Amino acid sequence: MSALTDLGIREIRDGVRAGTFSAREVAEAFNAAVAAAKPLNAFLVETPDHALAAADAADGARAAGEALGPLAGVPIGMKDLFCTKGVTSTAASHILEGFTPPYESTVSQKLWDAGAGMLGKLNMDQFAMGSSNETSAFGNVISPWRRSDGGNAALAPGGSSGGSSAAVAARIAPGATGTDTGGSIRQPAAFTGISGIKPTYGRCSRWGVIAFASSLDQAGPMARDVRDCAIMLETMAGFDAKDATSLDLPVPQWESMLDAGLKGKRVGVPKEYRVDGMPAEIEALWQQGIAWMKDAGAEVVEVSLPHTKYALPAYYIIAPAEASSNLARYDGVRYGQRDLPDGANLQQMYAATRAAGFGDEVKRRILIGTYVLSAGFYDAYYTQAQKVRTLIARDFAAVWEKCDVLLTPTAPSAAFALGEKQADPLAMYLNDVFTVPASLAGLPAMSVPGGLDAAGLPLGLQIIGKPLDEQGVLNAALAIEERAGFAARPEAWW
Amino acid sequence: MSVDTATVKKVASLARIAIDDAAAERLVPELNNILGWIEQLGEVDTQGVEPMTAVIPNTLRLREDVVTDGGIRDAVLANAPAAEHGFFTVPKVIE
Amino acid sequence: MTVMQPSDTYRIKGATGDWEVVIGLEVHAQVTSNAKLFSGAATAFGAEPNTQVSLVDAAMPGMLPVPNRECIRQAVRTGMAIDAQINKWSRFDRKNYFYADLPQGYQISQLYHPLVGEGSIEIEDGETVKTIGVERIHVEQDAGKLMHDQHPTRSYVDLNRSGVALMEIVSRPDMRSPAEAGAYLRKLRAILRYVGSCDGNMEEGSMRADVNVSVRKPGEEFGTRTETKNVNSVRFVMAAIEHEASRQVDVLEAGGKIVQETRLFNPDTGTTRSMRSKEDAHDYRYFPDPDLLPLELDDAFLAECRASLPELPDAKRQRYEGLGITPYNADVLTAEVETARWFDALLEAGVAPVAASNWVTGELFGALNRIGKGIEESPVTPGQAAELLALVADGTLSGSLAKQVFEVMLETGEAPGRIVEERGLKQTSDTGAIEAVIAEVLAKNPNQLEQYRAGKEALFGFFVGQTMKAMGGKANPQVVNELLKKALAS
Ligand SMILES: [Mg+2]
Ligand SMILES: [Zn+2]
């Protein structure tokens, strides 16, 4: 395969600018790679023409001596949670099958305006609910990684941004958008040996992103390294008047401010993240991460986040509650699928449409969310969860007195086999144990590859930062990246 | 608090998701498992703690009262499973 | 069963004794604004279906609400107008239910922390004034519109109204008769129209009431209430209360129980019936809308709201009474904001308040009534009316001449001065001219003169009439009187 697909975002951007290769050559190479990677099931829709048109525009602009956008000539994958004008957008759910938005999400529009092209829409867990990409209505995404034991077990690429993680890890996209509600960028990044950052809540507009849990949902980039994430995030972030929760702040120049030297920085290690039954390999990686932080000049301090244990149960009240309401609009009236049994009245049509359209995990969460908000239970569940959320945010606020960033593992295990955890929803939820607290507090957090486990599968380290301090997160992640020297990549079997 | 089949059916009906008896019965242990786990939150002393309203300090911005949208009926109806004469249509409702 | 008046002792006579009616009203008033509460689509009435719909109003995936400042401002001003608590910190909640007129599957409303808290409205019933408590005013989205009669098996959905801003003004259950409910609604409507926060147009649905009714034996606890939805005129509200209260008495006296339910009013029959479609919608699962942050208002915003409030009906009525205007006239002049505005313009032009109030409530209202026009479309402007009244005050026109001039003004819209000029309708106070005419009259009527001088003083009116007639009605009657007395005495 052409070496062009081995290039990351920065290399493509710089190469196009310098004329080392044309944007069209890059787009063609990735289009071909996407077309050849069908067994991964990473893409729900392929849009080679979109990628080519953006590439031609970049080449044309360069030929005409015009200024190139910050992502000119870079083709990317778009998680199917982003509504894209004229291209079906389904959130990997049957209920939205055939839905063609007459609008473009703010984040995707920003990417196109910066000169990026779209390779296609990426598979994901249905409505972003899942940690393994097994809840997609359109089939599992298969991780490009395989265990080194020679077995061919199909592995989970993580979720919900599993199409994104698989595509970037498989080198069929140099970068992809993800969304993170409780870890949906960080956990799949960790599972597939790539980087991904969830910025501070409010940095990226939620306008045009199909909602899962509004108070948690944040878009972010997934790419091969920290610098590529910084480049992409600069384009994706920014104030949007159409999103009432958008932060009206300038977007920092994260890429140019990257600095892996951590002298004078304090890195906190929260003791509550050392959970029961954590595999020794995860613990070992964490210790390695601590050593790298010290090596980069940071002072490492042990800190305490006393309410950590309650983050996951609070999340599994708040997110389903919001989701039960956010997903009420899928009723078969204005878009998507309608199931109208003979003689059904309006309410029966709703019930039939939603029964046929939503997958099991989505239904499960809608039911939990409906239950915890229902009469008599609201205060005990929802209000209590939002109070616990306040306590969790306070824990973090107190910790920032003692350190600048936190270092934790991203996930409690490496990628598991597809089907392995599907029977037990609760076991699946526990995957998010390390990522959910930062989500509840709206903090920027990133996963960066740290090494491989004994089976040759990637493991990730997580950096959590202060509100708005994406730079601190990126810098600490870069320090790890430089020291980890993570160069492993899945061998193409597809 | 744990749910039984009748509660699951009631909640499903509130959520407008049709489920048959078998599905309801299957959901009972599943939901109880999750709810039982969630209920550990009850341990936390939250007296005097305000529920979270905004994770990152931010205030609600208000829009100016200007008409900037509408007049896009084709786009509004474009994805409708059933529409006629400029309306969405649904099975007849008796109020 | 008979219904007893007057309203302060309004009772329903049942077989088991008297019943008292307890009424609370939830009024939905459409906020006057150009654009919707959370989207930039227009709010104008009567547009083609689904043409005033944004992707937000149609609840397309990923669409988000952003609130309209003017809608918040108008609700705050309304709260200030009823002396209510204004909450500087409020927030929006979602009310979740499924219906074809509700695209999001929830209505964005305010349950836990409404924008406006406790206030009150005074209503008058004859001599007595009663204070009706207002529990709260919250801001929320209107739903779309369903049409059931366009197709045999389908209902049609029009989302033009979807997302239009409403104020829900919730009264305390303080009313005790249909008449009080009517007075409350009329007063509320007047206040909204003065403030300019709602046009009060009930036919177009800008104002409609959910009517909560229960009955009880006087002195007992509140009974179970029913809620009759979306009643859209004062008359219908009163009729719905009357019917619903009687129905409840019948049910209770027959040994039955009142079911807390939602009902519909049928204007054709004047009756209410249970509403099937909302039967199981009682668990709304309210929770704070996570797409919106808390609404925090600063002092400058509140100060502007307060400063922009006009004089309100009660204050205006008091001011008018202070000018010597009768309570009845003051009431009539302040009931409708257009009348009050017109009258204020007249006062500003410098007319005498009492004469002006009499003229407006008599001459002007009579004329407008005759030509079937509202005061806002009066062919005579306050400026012209002031000129007319000034011509009467300075003696240029007599009362009857003024009537003639006013008729011409109504027809032509011309200024009174010009009409007087052109048609020669000016009253004369020219003593020389009047004296000459009087001399002539006395000369022509020697018999009457003799009788008068012999003591038949009733003939004075005869001479006045003859003089006025000879002058074509344009003589100043006071001058005629004086000169005649002098001439007859000499
Ligand atoms: Mg109501
Ligand atoms: Zn309401």
Image (spheres, coloured by chain):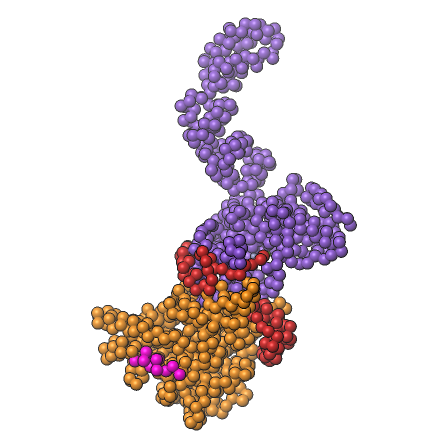
Residue C471 visible here: yes
Left of A467 or right of it: where is A252? left
Left of A301 or right of it: where is A33? left
Residue B30 quadrant: bottom right
Where residue C411 appears, as percent x and y from the top left, is: 45, 30
Which quadrant, please, contains the C terminus of chain B? Answer: bottom right
Rendered colour, chain B: red
Q: Against B52, is A21 above or below?
A: below
Rendered colour, chain C: purple
State the residue in front, C3 or A312: C3
Q: Is residue C126 magenta?
A: no
State the residue in front, A210 or C74: A210
Rendered colour, chain A: orange
Left of A86 or right of it: where is A344? right
Residue A311 quadrant: bottom right
Residues rendered magenta in the picture: A29-39
Residue at (70, 42) in percent of width and height? C5
Q: Against C57, is A178 above or below?
A: below
Residue at (51, 9) in percent of width and height? C441
Residue at (63, 47) in percent of width and height? C270
The quadrant where ligand 1 appears is bottom right
Farthest residue, direction bottom: A149
State the residue in front, A84 or C406: A84
Q: Main secondary structure of the magenta part?
A: helix
Where residue C80 appears, as percent x and y from the top left, is: 54, 51
